[in-house]
Amino acid sequence: PSFLILNGPNLNLLGTRQPEVYGATTLADIEAMCRARGADLGIGIDFHQSNHEGQLIDWVHAARGRHSGIVLNAGAYTHTSVALMDALSSVEVPVAEVHLSNIHRREPFRHHSYISKVAVGMICGFGAYGYVLAIEALRDNLNLPD
Ligand code: DQA
């Protein structure tokens, strides 16, 4: 089995972007953490980032029949993108939503998520470790073999 891990806009700047909010961990660090945990669990990891909504949607479409699950940090598209939500509904691949920050203790415009409407569950506020938690939680949810 393999998981698709998708990262939305501005997450390429992690490490230097508002470190007081998002921490010092870079996206490359997160990718390494995900690959290591995936290898432990026998799950292949495809890891991507884009600042473009359409590119994220294309990757979601391509996951159909190819990946067992999607771990998604859609960045600000979380709060705006009906198109990404629709893409996730269309492909019927289970989704774990992740946010580094606790979006519910931030500005009100971050409290609503279109992604949550189509996700199995959501992990937020635990920084980079949330990605690892999401991999584990999605694996448990799918009852993947040991
Ligand atoms: C984020 C939270 C979003 O509100 C924000 O737009 C991001 C990052 C997070 O990981 O905490 O870009 O998804």
Image (spheres, rainbow, N blue to C red):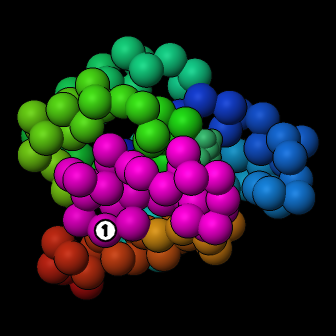
Residue 70's x, y, as percent? 32, 51
* Lateral position of residue 42 relative to residue 25, left or right: left
What are the residue bounds of the magenta stretch?
95-122
Residue closest to the far front: 108
- State the residue position of label 1: 121
Does mark 1's beta carbon lie closer than 8 Å to ligand 1? no
Residue 122's x, y, as percent? 39, 66
Location of the N terminus by quadrant is: bottom left
Work out whether 88 lies above or below 141. Answer: above
* Lateral position of residue 17 relative to residue 124, left or right: right
Which residue does the image show at 84% across and 41% down from the upper left? 17
Residue 72's x, y, as percent? 42, 48
11 magenta-colored:
no
13 or 113: nearer the eye?
A: 113
Graded by Cα atoms within 10 Å as few (under 14), some (14 to 19) or many (20 or more), the crowding at tag 1 reads some
90 or 110: nearer the eye?
A: 110
Which residue does the image show at 64% across and 73% down from the upper left? 126
- The answer to whether one can see residue 5 in this image is no
- The answer to whether one can see residue 145 in this image is yes
Work out whether 79 lies above or below 94. Answer: above
Work out whether 97 lies above or below 17. Answer: below
Which residue does the image show at 32% across and 44% down from the upper left? 114
67 or 10: nearer the eye?
A: 10
Amino acid type assigned to the residue bearing label 1 in the image: Gly
Which residue does the image show at 31% across and 68% down from the upper left? 121
111 magenta-colored:
yes
* Lateral position of residue 75 relative to residue 45, left or right: right
The local secondary structure at tag 1 comes to strand
Residue 12's x, y, as percent? 70, 33
